[in-house]
Amino acid sequence: MTQPGCVDGYKNYLGIDDSEYQDWFGVVGRSRDSGILEESNFAKALEMLGGDGDNVRVERYGHWACGWIEEVYVRPGTPECLIAEEIERKLDNYPILDEDDFGRRETDEAARYWAILSIADRIELCKRFGVCIFAARRDEVPSDDTGGLEAYLCS
């Protein structure tokens, strides 16, 4: 672990001195402002590593710019470190660790957003994405041929 939050150095950190963990391997992180992709990858990586434990730590930091940061660190030379290296290789090749989890989170987020829209806003979105405007009355997010409406609702 090089520095808390990957932004500030230890000289600016006022929390617990955890410098004994400096050499641990950083895997993934998230913040208050993370999107669906970061949340999905964080949860999946932590699951793959077996959760917080002796060789895996979830460090939580308050941060002046983004409220808070959580990062997953792994002790070097452990079986979990091998898993962390595999996670890193996967993310180097493709940004999503688990398509199913990511897709579920996208669908859930789109449904939450759709539920709070007014009928007028729903009609405008239906028009914009080429969906029948009568679909605006439905509780579920209407589908279009491209998936653009759901993607728009998640962005």
Image (tube, grey):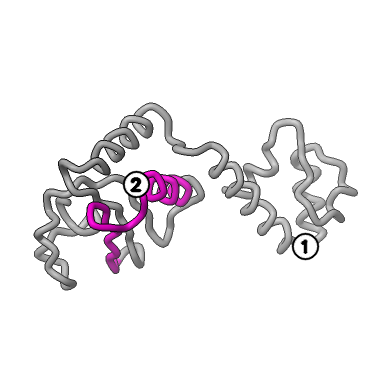
Q: Position of residue 129 (x, y in %)?
A: 75, 39
Q: Going by the picture, which residue comes out furthest to the right?
A: 134
> Image point 24% across, 40% down: which residue?
79
Q: Residues within 10 Å of mark 1 (few under 14, many from 20)?
A: few
Q: Look at the numbered disc 1 and give the secondary structure of its residue.
A: loop
> Image point 62% across, 53% down: which residue?
109
> Quick check: 111 above or below 143?
below
Left or right of residue 134: residue 122 = left
Name the residue tied to disc 1. 118
Q: Is residue 39 magenta?
A: yes
The magenta-colored residue range is 38-64
> Quick check: 121 above or below 145?
below
Left or right of residue 150: residue 102 = left
Q: Look at the numbered disc 2 and give the secondary structure of its residue.
A: loop
Q: Position of residue 91 (x, y in %)?
A: 37, 34
Picture disc at residue 138:
none
> Quick check: 36 above or below 112?
above
Which residue is more in the foreground, 108 or 129?
108
Left or right of residue 30: residue 77 = left
Dividing the picture into quarters, in which one does residue 11 lie? Answer: bottom left
Q: Is residue 41 magenta?
A: yes
Q: Residues within 10 Å of mark 2 (few under 14, many from 20)?
A: many
Distance from Cα at disc 2 to Cα at disc 1: 42 Å
Picture disc at residue 49:
2
- Which callout, 2 or 1, points at the residue further toward the start of the chain? 2
Q: Position of residue 59 (x, y in %)?
A: 27, 61
**Amino acid carrying mark 1 in the image:** Ser
Q: Position of residue 142 (x, y in %)?
A: 79, 45
